Amino acid sequence: MSISGKTAIAGVGTTQFGKLPGSTAWGLQAEAVRLALEDAGLTKDDVDGLFTEPQFNEPLLLHGHVIGRMLGMKPNFLSTQSLGGATAIALIQHAAMAIEERLCEVAVCLFGETAKTGLPMLFGAPQMGRGQSDDIAFGVAGGAVMEARSAMRYMHEYNVTHEMLGSVAITFRDHASKNPAAQYQKPLTMEEYLGTPFVSEPFRRYDCAITSDGGVAVVVTSAERARDLRKPPAYITGIGQAHNLDGLRDPNHYTHFAGARSSERAFRMAGVRPEDVDAMQFYDCFTSTVLITLEDYGYCKKGEGGPFALEGNLGLGKALPSNTSGGSLSEADLAGWNQIAEGVRQVRNECDERQVPNAQTVVVAGHGGFQASHATLVISKDQP
Amino acid sequence: MRDLESTGRTRVADATASAGPLVDLVIGMKPVVIPETSGFWDGTVVQELRIQKCNACGNTQLPGGPCCANCLSQDLTWVKSNGTGRVFSFSIVHQALHPSFMDRVPYVVADIQLDEGPIVLSNVTDVDPHDVRIGLRVAVWFDEQDTDAFGVPFRLPKFKPSEQ
């Protein structure tokens, strides 16, 4: 029996995004939780499930224990996961399953980090395990060098141009210009995009997710309970994950992510087809990631994502309005969590100037773990 | 630098001011040799590029692991690779996010598909980075000998363009 529509997101909390001197990851996590509970009209005492993703610059053992203690919680269900940019959706999936099985009733899922002003993010032996970070010795430091090799192969195989990559950054920046919470709101031109030097070829600065301080929390509960709360429910109608754990060791994975499998599962659970989706919130850690995910999700054939984006189809009012908040390229990069908050606000019709009219079904994509992991979330205004 | 700030999730300049074994370990500037990969790194010391091979099913794999990822057999051995292959993909790094690489930019990080099949991550050297292309024929060479944070010797296997 499917969990489709049995649970809903009842509250979202987002802190300020950007450069927040003096903030801490713990403080941002706590603030996001308080805001999410206020949004749902619930109190801390209602929460009996806690689902956490550790901050990247301190990937701690027992993260859930620490933040749970700080929040004064005594949950009946505790889960901490580390799946890179797929973690947020995977945690919500775990929460939905736990709620459906009556293992907990009100779940808070949280993430917050100080990537902009805090400690550096490290991927050495203490974080990754001895012998599991040897690539750094060849100068592979930071996500751009990882995904750039996928992008280089993708551009080579399918004649994807820099203008196609740039169109993604430009469109999402245009959306961010309509979002007062976005970290970067100044419109971006193709000339400016192409005039910026390479960071890790083929990526220029604007191909890469920005760096942010911030926190996001999501309240998940049963559909019945969500209907009695302060805000309209955003029903979780489809959810799936899939992993290509050999990543770039497999030649196919440069141009085909696990998103094809995770979206197929999520769309089937929700009973929707790609063309039924009113808005997409991609995990846009890099511009090429969006194009490849578009294809993996069935919006375009392989190699046609670039022309589709260049034609402007990802813009508000166009075929597939995407990353309506500006996403990780312009609003904030918080490991895909802010994309979920935006998806919920779209189906609640709270997005003012950037609102997609009558948004009924929004899909969120999570992608990460050195390109290995993908997760897909379908949220709907109406219960199926 | 603004560009660094906007993309640099690894601002480690201050942290590496006093480089040493602990920093190598924490930051990952050097490999850490473990039993699962020691066949590979031991090979580099005698200037052999080695691939892990499964004696049960014949699968070859890199990096080394505790079992064959195809059949889960733990009857594994290390075999010598010819050390030749082609650039499957690459990136030219222009902004090193790690201070120990800042004086090397631009440098090429490449995925080399060995003629035996497996893809190995390395650098392509001895060529103008802008002349590197997907499909370029390359051959392995071995950088100077060094030791990891625990004193185990290794050489980094790198690649340079080769004739057909």
Image (cartoon, coloured by chain):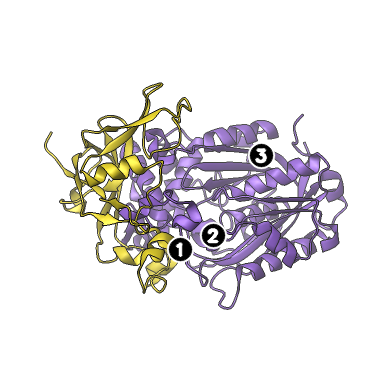
Residue A348 got which mark? none
The chain letter of the purple chain reads A
Residue A56 image label: 2
Question: In the shown orientation, is residue A30 left or right of residue A43?
Answer: left
Vertical placement of residue A239 versus B123, above or below:
above
Q: Do labels 1 and 3 share a chain?
A: no
On the rendered image, what quadrant is the C terminus of chain A found in?
top right
Q: Chain B is drawn in which colour?
A: yellow
Tell me the quarter of the image containing the N terminus of chain A. Answer: top right
Q: Which dot, 1 or 3, sits closer to the camera?
A: 1
Letter of the chain that mark 1 sits on in the rendering = B
Give yes or no for contact between labels 1 and 2 (Cβ–Cβ under 8 Å): yes
Residue appearing at x 29%, y 44% in the figure: B42
Label 2 element class: loop
Give the residue furthest to the left: B163
Please name the amino acid that badge 1 sits on.
Answer: Arg
> In the image, A377: left or right of B82?
right
Same-chain status of marks 1 and 2: no
Q: What residue is shown at x 58% (from left), y 36% (from top)?
A: A262
Q: Which residue lies furthest to the top in this view?
A: B57
Left or right of residue A353: residue A100: right
Q: Assign a secondary structure to mark 1.
A: loop
Nearer to us: label 1 or label 2: 2
For the residue pair A19 and B45, the one nearer the viewer reads as: B45
Q: Position of residue A350 (x, y in %)?
A: 71, 58
| Location of residue A260 in the rendering, given as x and y in whole percent from the top left corner | 53, 34
Q: Residue A144, percent across and down?
A: 40, 55
Disc ID at residue A239: 3
